[in-house]
């Protein structure tokens, strides 16, 4: 089963400094048919203007993965963590029992991110933050784990039996992801156009996938894709 959710059907709001699109119900956007996909709770497609961002605010009991598409995002939290994550790289915050953080675009250009929230397997725990570079060349023609709570993955750790993967595909190239019929996947091309099982998914569309042993993604044009695998 593959349900394509076209970009122009997504919820969202333009706040001037932030233009946000929501694949799932979030903030003032509510769609009872799009509240989550398995343990995937949020997928926001954010455009953040230069020298602006999210002031300090709290989170708890959520795995928050930020995939930077363009520009950079600067993180600071009340545990003393701080860092700058550039395009192509990923940061993860396990909110655990509670953390307050800010995220700003301190650059001279707009920043584009995917922010992905996954429900943790257990509540509470010590909050953590981390970031890591993931060169796009290392995921050329194949899926590479970027953030994962699955044993054996070389990725940023999260506290859920879930995986966030990325792939870069040349036009005509295919990559296969082993999913399993007991799992769900949600895929978004950051750029390009891809085809899965005869269905076309364009840049920033979402594809909700279930009941497939494997997902075969074929690029119609050069593409950068992000896939979340959850229970």
Image (cartoon, helix red, strand yellow):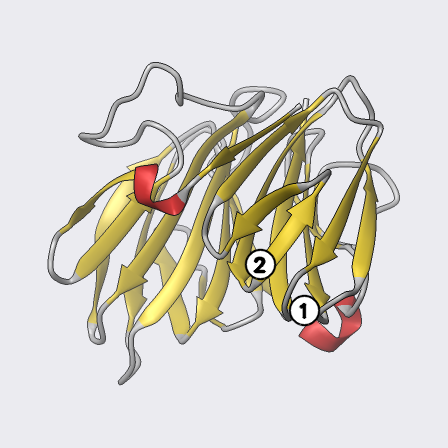
Q: Tell me if residue 14 can be seen.
A: yes
- In the image, taking residue 228 as reference, residue 92 lies left or right, namely left
Q: In front: 167, or 61?
A: 167
Name which quarter of the figure residue 32 lies in.
Answer: top left
Residue sitting at the far bottom: 108
Would you say the residues marked 2 and 1 are in contact, meaning their CB atoms lie under 8 Å apart?
Answer: no
**Looking at the rendered structure, which numbered label has been put on residue 92?**
none
Is label 2 in a helix, a strand or a loop? Answer: strand
- Residue found 74% across the figure and 55% down from its top: 218
- Residue found 56% across the figure and 37% down from its top: 207
Residue for badge 1: 134
> Eyeballing the image, is 88 above or below 5?
below
Q: Quadrant of the C terminus?
A: top right
Q: Quadrant of the N terminus?
A: top right
- Residue found 57% across the figure and 70% down from its top: 88
**Could you classify mark 1 by the number of other residues whose Cα lies within 10 Å: few (under 14), some (14-19), or many (20 or more)?**
some
- In the image, taking residue 159 as reference, residue 58 lies left or right, namely left
- Of labels 2 and 1, earlier in sequence is 1
**Looking at the rendered structure, which numbered label has been put on residue 193?**
2
Residue 204 in picture, x, y percent from top left: 45, 52
- Residue found 26% across the figure and 64% down from its top: 48
């Amino acid at each position: 089963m593959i349900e394509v959710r076209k970009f122009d059907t997504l919820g969202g709001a333009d706040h001037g400094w932030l233009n946000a699109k929501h694949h799932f119900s979030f903030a003032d956007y509510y769609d009872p048919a799009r509240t989550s996909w398995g343990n995937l709770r949020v997928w926001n497609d954010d455009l953040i203007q230069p020298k602006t961002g999210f002031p300090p605010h709290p989170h708890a009991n959520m795995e928050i993965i930020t995939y930077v598409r363009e520009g950079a995002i600067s993180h600071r939290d009340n545990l003393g963590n701080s860092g700058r994550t550039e395009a192509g790289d990923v940061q993860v915050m396990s909110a655990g029992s509670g953390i307050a953080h800010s995220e700003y675009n301190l650059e001279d250009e707009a920043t584009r991110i995917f922010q992905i929230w996954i429900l943790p397997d257990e509540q509470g725990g010590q909050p953590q933050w981390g970031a890591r570079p993931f060169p796009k060349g290392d995921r050329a023609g194949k899926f590479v784990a970027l953030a994962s709570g699955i044993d054996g993955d070389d990725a940023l750790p999260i506290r859920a039996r879930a995986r966030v993967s990325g792939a870069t595909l040349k036009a005509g190239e295919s990559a296969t992801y082993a999913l399993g019929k007991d799992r769900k996947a949600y895929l978004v091309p950051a750029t390009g156009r891809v085809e899965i099982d005869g269905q076309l998914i364009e840049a920033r569309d979402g594809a909700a996938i279930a009941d497939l042993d494997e997902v075969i993604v074929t690029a119609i044009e050069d593409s950068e894709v992000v896939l979340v695998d959850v229970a």
